[in-house]
Amino acid sequence: MPVEVRLPNILRPLAGGEPVVKAEGATLREVFDDLVSRYPGLEASLFTPEREMHRHLNVFLNDDDVRYLGRLDAKVSESDTVTLMPAVAGGAD
């Protein structure tokens, strides 16, 4: 079942320039694996070397932060939207 994945500007070049792509999977991990199988350049942005969710990536399933839904084990369904957002840090001294 495909879900819609919205990509931030910084990741779009790794997915052929597309702002939105479709991916298959019943869990977020399966969706990420499907994305990486089609767009290998996304792997380092989505996963750590240990295959956990990259800590500098905020992920929302519909409007909910996946950190509260089971992270990579979060269940997804066909009508869901996954939004990827790079973490922002920094500020003035």
Image (spheres, rainbow, N blue to C red):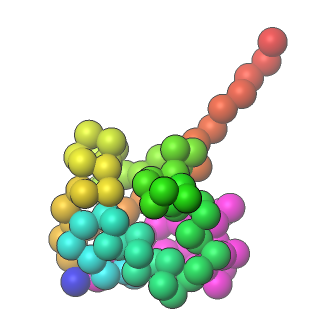
The residue sitting at 47% across, 47% down in the picture is: 58
Lateral position of residue 88 relative to residue 32, left or right: right
The residue sitting at 52% across, 44% down in the picture is: 55
Q: How many marks?
A: 0
Lateral position of residue 21 relative to residue 73, left or right: right
Residue 34 in which image quadrant: bottom left
- In magenta stretch: residue 5: yes
Position in image of residue 22 (x %, y %): 39, 81
Q: Quadrant of the N terminus?
A: bottom left
Residue span colored magenta: 2-20
The residue sitting at 66% across, 32% down in the picture is: 89
Position in image of residue 51 (x %, y %): 45, 60
Work out whether residue 36 or residue 76 is closer to the camera in this orientation and state it.
36
Determine whether 71 is above or below 40 in the image.
above
Determine whether 77 is above or below 50 in the image.
below
The residue sitting at 79% across, 18% down in the picture is: 92
